[in-house]
Structures are given as structure tokens and as C-alpha cells.
């Protein structure tokens, strides 16, 4: 379980980017994080995996306090937090297999990491992960030979290679076409279901989030202004999260104009 209590983040003397965030995410729950640009979504994810340090508050994963952990402890705990990036964050010149295996670097000794000598079990598991994401036939291709959707699948396989306890996903469909976006979200959903993985997905596509996540958290100005099921999203809630807008479908807006 991920537990966040009274989390705040402020950069120097600027305004609070995150203001008293309190969350509990149980095993297996998929959470969609929505809100306008600048609402604090990416900052929240970066605080959780300690890419940035919170100003105050606590973040614990399965009982381990990440917000107060030493640098060594943070490196150890990051092994259990799978991260899937918007821009894929692959090493372009390396093969698909090598990119997936890089998810195991946190478990290797210095010399194993330096020489990239992976245990056979890690290699066997990497093949299984590539099979799971539908890229087994591309294992030996360079990462820069792949399409955007394929690169995102490599990122998912790499995150799985970490054997994570939590999955953080930052805008997984931002650069993808609608069909591929649905495939990627469906893949993430099915993997979380299979493994009982909790996941937080920072996503701008609200209809896509409503289809594939269990719970939606809306951020506005660093505050949680909505926390509930996707079915509870309505015009009033969306206005609270994003501001005034006509949220009705375009055809309904046209019908109103014709009345």
C-alpha cells in the first residue's frame, strides 16, 4: 500500500505546488491523476519516487517511509517503484532486450552493472516480459527502430523487470494515436490486475482515464479537489478541476444552438 500524509512541496519561496496531499492507494488499485497543466500532477509523482524531495509530509510504501529515507535507502526503494515515462526514456542505441534488462540494474553489484552481466534468471524473465507486451520478435532490434507504441511497451516491460510494488506512469499516451493509446492503457490495466499492482497514472485524456482506471483524483492548484470513481465525474466536477467550460459533447451543444 502507498500512503501519503500531509505532503507539501514548495520551490524556494514560490507558492505551494502541492498543498497537504493525503492519499491511500491499496494493492491492485489503478488511479488516474487528472488536472490542468501546473496542477501538481508530475510533481506528486516525482515526490513519490523521490526524484524531488518533499518540503514536508510523509510518503510510505509498504511501511517504508520514503520521505525521510537516506540516499542509500532511496536507491534501494526505487527498485520497487516501476516508472513508465512519457518520452519512453530508452537508451536508443541499445537493443530492446538490453533496455528491458536495465530494469534489473538496481539489483546487481557494481561490477555486474558495469559489465552488464545479468543472471540467467533475469534474462529468462525479460523474455517473458517481452512476450507479455507483444515484442518478443523485436528483442534484438535497436530501440530507435521502434514505433512510439512499441517504445512505450518496452518501457512497460522494463518497469515489470524491476518486480515493482508500485507503478508510476507519466502521460503514457501523450504521443500516441487513439488506437495505440487504448492498447497501452488496456495493457497497463491487465498487468496491474494480474499482479495486484497499485498504479498512479498521470493522464490528460479524461475519457480514456474513465474507461481504464478504478479511481480518479483531480488536482487543482496543488489541492485535491476530487477523489472518487470515474462514474462520478460530471460537468460540475470537471469545472471544479479544470475551470469553466461547456463539457457537453459537440453534437449536444449544436442541438442547444438550434433550439
Image (cartoon, rainbow, N blue to C red):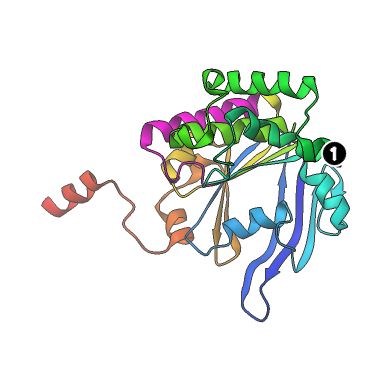
In this image, 200 relative to 121: left or right?
A: left
- Where is mark 1, residue-wise? 111
* Residue 168 in view in this figure: yes
Where does the magenta region start and end? Answer: 170-193
Q: Quadrant of residue 159?
A: top right
Q: Residue at x 59, y 35 (%)?
A: 94
Dominant secondary structure (helix, strand or loop) of the stretch shown in magenta: helix
In this image, 62 relative to 157: left or right?
A: right
In this image, 95 relative to 232: left or right?
A: right
Q: How many numbered marks does the figure carry?
A: 1
In this image, 16 relative to 67: left or right?
A: left
- Residue 218, magenta (yes or no): no
- What percent of the width, then of the height, locates residue 189? 57, 30
- What percent of the width, then of the height, locates residue 123? 72, 22
Tell me: residue 127, above or below residue 189: above
- SS at circle 1: helix
- What percent of the width, then of the height, locates residue 52? 71, 61
Q: Residue at x 77, y 57 (%)?
A: 5
* Residue 108 in view in this figure: no
- What percent of the width, then of the height, locates residue 46? 66, 56
Given residues 47 and 225, the one toward you in this image is 47
- Farthest residue in the front direction? 115
Q: Quadrant of residue 69?
A: bottom right
Q: Residues within 10 Å of mark 1 (few under 14, many from 20)?
A: few
- Residue 181, magenta (yes or no): yes
Amino acid at each position: 500500500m502507498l500512503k501519503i500524509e500531509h505532503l507539501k512541496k514548495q520551490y524556494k519561496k514560490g507558492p505551494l505546488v502541492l498543498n497537504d496531499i493525503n492519499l491511500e492507494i491499496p494493492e491492485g488499485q489503478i488511479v488516474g491523476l487528472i488536472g490542468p497543466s501546473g496542477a501538481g500532477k508530475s510533481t506528486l509523482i516525482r515526490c513519490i519516487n523521490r526524484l524531488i524531495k518533499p518540503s514536508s509530509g510523509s510518503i510510505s510504501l509498504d511501511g517504508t517511509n520514503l520521505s525521510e529515507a537516506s540516499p542509500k535507502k532511496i536507491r534501494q526503494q526505487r527498485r520497487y517503484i516501476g516508472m513508465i515515462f512519457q518520452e519512453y526514456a530508452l537508451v536508443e542505441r541499445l537493443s530492446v532486450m538490453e533496455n528491458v534488462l536495465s530494469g534489473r540494474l538496481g539489483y546487481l553489484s557494481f561490477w555486474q552493472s558495469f559489465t552488464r552481466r545479468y543472471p540467467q534468471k533475469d534474462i529468462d524473465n525479460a523474455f517473458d516480459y517481452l512476450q507479455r507486451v507483444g515484442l518478443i520478435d523485436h528483442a534484438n532490434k535497436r530501440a530507435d527502430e521502434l514505433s512510439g507504441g512499441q517504445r512505450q511497451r518496452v518501457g512497460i516491460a522494463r518497469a515489470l523487470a524491476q518486480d515493482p510494488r508500485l507503478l508510476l506512469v507519466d502521460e503514457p499516451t501523450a504521443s500516441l494515436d487513439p488506437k495505440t493509446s487504448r492498447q497501452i492503457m488496456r495493457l497497463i490495466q491487465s498487468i496491474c490486475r494480474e499482479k495486484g499492482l497499485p498504479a498512479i497514472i498521470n493522464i490528460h485524456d479524461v475519457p480514456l482515464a474513465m474507461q481504464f482506471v478504478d479511481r480518479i483524483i483531480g488536482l487543482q492548484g496543488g489541492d485535491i479537489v476530487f477523489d472518487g470513481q470515474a462514474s462520478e465525474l460530471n460537468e460540475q466536477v470537471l469545472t471544479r478541476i479544470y475551470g469553466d467550460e461547456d463539457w457537453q459533447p459537440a453534437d449536444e451543444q449544436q442541438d442547444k444552438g438550434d433550439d
